[in-house]
Image (cartoon, grey):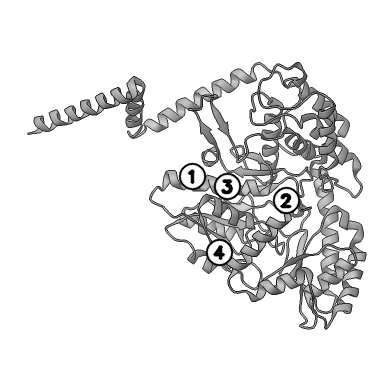
Amino acid sequence: MLALIGEALLAYVVIVAVQILINDGLFGLAKVFVQRIRDLPGVDLLIGAVIKREADSFLRQIDSKRSPTVEMSIKIPEKGISHDDLREEMKQLKGEEVNLDDGQIFAYVYTAQNEHYKAMEDAYLAFTDTTGTGTEKGDTDHETLVREFLRAFMHENALNPIVFPALRRFETETAAMAADMLNGDANVVGSLTSGGTESILMAIKTYRDRARSLFPHIKSPEMVAPITIHPAFEKAAHYFDVKIVHVPLDSDFKPNLDKYRQAITSRTILLLASAPQYCHGIVDPIEEIGNIAREKGLPFHVDACFGGFMLPWVEKLGYTVPKFDFRVEAVTSISADIHKYGYGLKGASLILYRNSDIRKYQLFAYSEWPGGLFGSPGMTGSRPGGNIAASWAALRAIGQDGYLRMARRLMEATLALRDGIERIPGLAILGKPEMTAFAIASTDSHLDILALADAMEEKGWRMERQQFPNSLHCTILPHHVTLVDKLLNDLRESAENVRGKKAKGGTAAIYGMVGKIPDKAIVDTFIKQFLSDVYTCKT
């Protein structure tokens, strides 16, 4: 009987092999054979080890052809490097790149070497936002430096890190410096992105693909987040078909931990929190959520796009900052924007992972294109090299001493503003912010906070309105340091002028309308219609 079964199985295998051979040839037969072999225990680990060995060997061959002349950076220097020294390093690193003027490159760069080329550069630089890059008000030298790095590498394309080795170096060293700042070890890896939204998109894509690989039984993945999580996560949830489950806030504007725990189900693939959340400048309870993540065996992403380049320095200055970074063992990834308090150019952000085993789910590869082997670390294909170079330059030029100096000045201005606002009758700061941002609310039913915003805008201020509850958001930036007294005086005067009055028209009318519509899908449709009109050329 057993012999008959064995013969039948052998006959079946032969028939299947012949069919594959007829349809797909020897290569197809070999492909199926390898796929079946990979199902055996331990085989994938062996293949992975061989692949890593070969990839490392290939990279060593490439690197052996170059002799870097600039010392590598894996930490933000204790003292900022002089601009002249950085300019010299830029020249040396630029000299190791492919010379575009030689015409010996056949891809990646599509620019004309003529007056049109120069005109494009001038136009781009003229409209490049460098207002946030100055570490001091009027610090035009730092702005000039980052612009020089931008111009030097603006036509290079990080799509291929082998063709443009300086860009690869800028990116890996910038990630290493940020990882060290956020108390990560040598295993932390990351990617530079076009901004916080792309960093967040890549994090959610990574954890979705990780869940697909490790937990294929989860068909409708979910992630849990406080209601204050940035809308970019809502966009990521929409794009990648991962449901986001919101957790309400307690009176301190932090998520209710009991409800956070209750929101976790068998479909949960990721936990989320902010450091700090943008709305009120308050750091979510990262350690406590980390305990939940460890207990449930779930990955945990911290969105530090807003505070990643400010909180470390605020803590070093002696202010109370809850642990939010890689010191919390359960944290598996962090997003942090260089173009915010890192004082780099728009747009530049980082997504960092605790190790490459997690980061591998972010990467995309396609090996069957006739145009060659294709791989990409992020959402974008072509990536302009200028912002990558400028990010590296910004971290090295400012140094730890520069970041500490700016954090001190901004925190002093922030505390002076918060104290002054609390002294204005009818106004209060929501919660207890840990950083250089806060929200102003009204404690007086006769003082409409939206009317106050309108009055402040008549004085030239551009106020950021918020809801649930209505409030005004303030992020304190270098140019605010000398305006503390003026801002407080204008707030005090405007509060007195609008007391007893209701906001009328404009943004206030829109927020009033939104608050009265229970079906937020209608509001979403209004926002889309508004955006459609805004981005339509009308004569």
Q: Position of residue 36 (x, y in %)?
A: 32, 31
Residue 82 drawn at (x, y percent)? 87, 34
Amino acid at circle 2: Pro
The residue carrying pointer 3 sits among few (fewer than 14), some (14 to 19) or many (20 or more) residues within 10 Å by Cα, namely many
Which label is found at residue 209? 1
Q: Secondary structure at mark 4?
A: strand
Distance from label 2 to label 1 (Cα)? 31 Å
- Mark 2 or mark 3: whose residue is earlier in sequence: 3
> Which is nearer the eye, 279 or 60?
279
**If you read the primary sequence from the N terminus, does the residue marked by circle 4 or circle 2 appear first?**
4
Q: Earlier in the sequence, mark 3 or mark 4?
A: 3
Name the element at disc 3: helix
The residue tagged 3 is 203
Q: Is residue 441 left or right of residue 257?
A: right
**Quick one: label 4 or label 1, which is nearer the N terminus?**
1
Q: Amino acid at mark 1?
A: Asp
Label whose residue precedes the other's in the sequence (1 or 3) = 3
- Give the CA separation, mark 4 to mark 1: 22 Å
Judged from the image, the secondary structure of the residue bearing numbered disc 1 is helix
Q: Which residue is mark 4?
A: 246
